[in-house]
Amino acid sequence: MEDNFNKHLGKKLRIRRLSLGLTQTKVAQAINVTFQQIQKYEKGTNGVSSNRLMQLAQFLKVPIIYFFEDFREFKDVNENDATVNSNDDLNYSFLSRTFSSLSKLQKEKILQILNNTSKFERVG
């Protein structure tokens, strides 16, 4: 389970880092490690200590639970939900909270982009 979690956490770290437009070097500097260490975290090669996890959560502006919310084994144990589908990689509660915190104009722009994207997908 530990190996799986390291890979899961690394994936979540990478997704969040990229969504904020940050480099591995920038994240590394913020938590006082090398960019190679961030690479190892993202690949799941190295585990993240609780102290580092707190630092990452603070710097990336996410609650610590963000790293756990959609972890399969965590869900199985805590929700007795053994079913997994392709949408489990998405963190809907995080997206929902983030979307809710946007201004009306920002929400409208995102919805406009999504509408345009869906039209493009139907045509293509």
Image: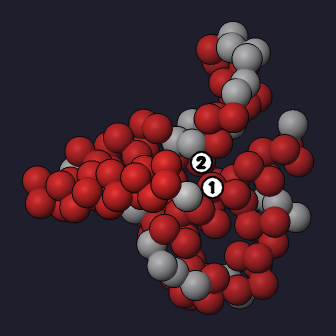
- Based on the displayed image, in which of its 4 quarters is residue 117 positioned? bottom left
Quadrant location of the N terminus in the rendered image: top right
Say which of marks 2 and 1 sits in front.
1
Q: Give the amino acid type for the residue marked by disc 1 in the picture.
A: Lys
**In the depicted structure, whether residue 35 falls above or below residue 59:** below
* Secondary element at image label 1: helix
- Residue drawn 55% across and 72% down? 18
Which residue is label 1 attached to? 12
**In the depicted structure, whether residue 93 falls above or below residue 83:** below
* Residue that sits furthest to the left in the current view: 104
Residue 87, percent from left and from top: 62, 35
Which residue is label 2 attached to? 67
**In the depicted structure, whether residue 89 falls above or below residue 47:** above
* Secondary element at image label 2: helix
Quadrant location of the C terminus in the rendered image: bottom right
Q: Nearer the viewer, residue 88 or 32?
A: 88
Q: How is the image coloured?
A: secondary structure
- Residue drawn 72% across and 24% down? 84
- Residue drawn 23% across and 45% down? 100
* Residue that sits furthest to the top in the current view: 80
Q: Give the amino acid type for the residue marked by disc 2 in the picture.
A: Phe
Residue 46, percent from left and from top: 84, 64
